[in-house]
Amino acid sequence: MKDRLSLLDYLTLAVFGLQAALALHIGVNGPTTPMPMHWNGDWQVDRWGSRVEFATFLGGMTLIGFIGAAGLGLGAMRAASQGDASRGRSLRIGQGISLFTFAAIGLLMTWSGLGNATAETGPVVTMAGVSLILLVLGAFLGRVAPNPLVGVRTPWSYKSRLAWDRSNRLAGRLLFLLGVVGLIAAPVAPQPLGALSLIGAVLMAAALSVFESWRVWRADPDRQPF
């Protein structure tokens, strides 16, 4: 049957279930001393919280990630049941992106929150982890169909399929390149300058992709009006 759960659906349930269990474990059995919740630009902890607060934040992020990935999975099943296999595959790619991204961020959060992120190691590991996320995201972003969760979601990309495709392909190429450069530079770049520079480059890539969605929409004769 076309509406059966796929392997990716079971993986979504398993990964987010484990992450939820980890959040619960930290909330009940985590450190009784304050846990770091936020770092400033010099990678110094500027806010601390209890294990319950940390577990609540991790659990909330897990819930958001699960809703997003599961929603894309349901959309893929619906598209397949309607005979639109191409859209179904592209939404599955979006589901995989969402699953990987939220799981990786959860691991980075947990690693940092349990006191492993020092001023020396924190920026390096974070930069490498974020770069890996960018690399995977960039490798697949250009193949995601229009949806409300993953991709360059602008008013113009929703009004033009051409604008959606081209802006997401551009974003994918830029993020993939940043991911490769970030992974290479993470061990040797001066920190926290390296990590901050990566964040700035991502913001620039996002701005360029948004502009591209507007530019292509404006020139698309098949665009939908507002």
Image (cartoon, rainbow, N blue to C red):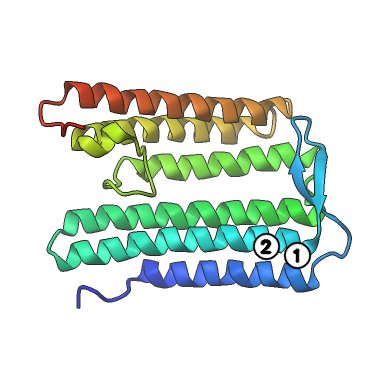
At mark 2, the secondary structure is helix
Image coordinates of residue 222 in percent, x first then y, are 11, 31
Question: In the rendered structure, are the residues bearing label 2 and label 1 in contact, judged by CB atoms less than 8 Å apart?
Answer: yes
Towards the viewer: 14 or 152:
152
Residue in the picture at 10% in, 26% down: 221
Residue in the picture at 74% in, 69% down: 27
At mark 1, the secondary structure is helix
Determine which residue is flagged by label 1. 52
Image coordinates of residue 120 in percent, x first then y, are 80, 37
Residue 167, by quadrant, is: top left
Towards the viewer: 17 or 60:
60
Residue in the picture at 40% in, 23% down: 208
Image coordinates of residue 85 in percent, x first then y, are 17, 59
Is residue 211 shown left or right of residue 192? left
Determine which residue is flagged by label 2. 56
Q: Amino acid at mark 1?
A: Val
Is residue 89 shown left or right of residue 114? left
For disc 2, the neighbor class at 10 Å (few under 14, some 14 to 19, many from 20) is: some
Distance from Cα at disc 2 to Cα at disc 1: 6 Å
Q: Amino acid at mark 2?
A: Thr
Is residue 181 shown left or right of residue 157? right
For disc 1, the neighbor class at 10 Å (few under 14, some 14 to 19, many from 20) is: many
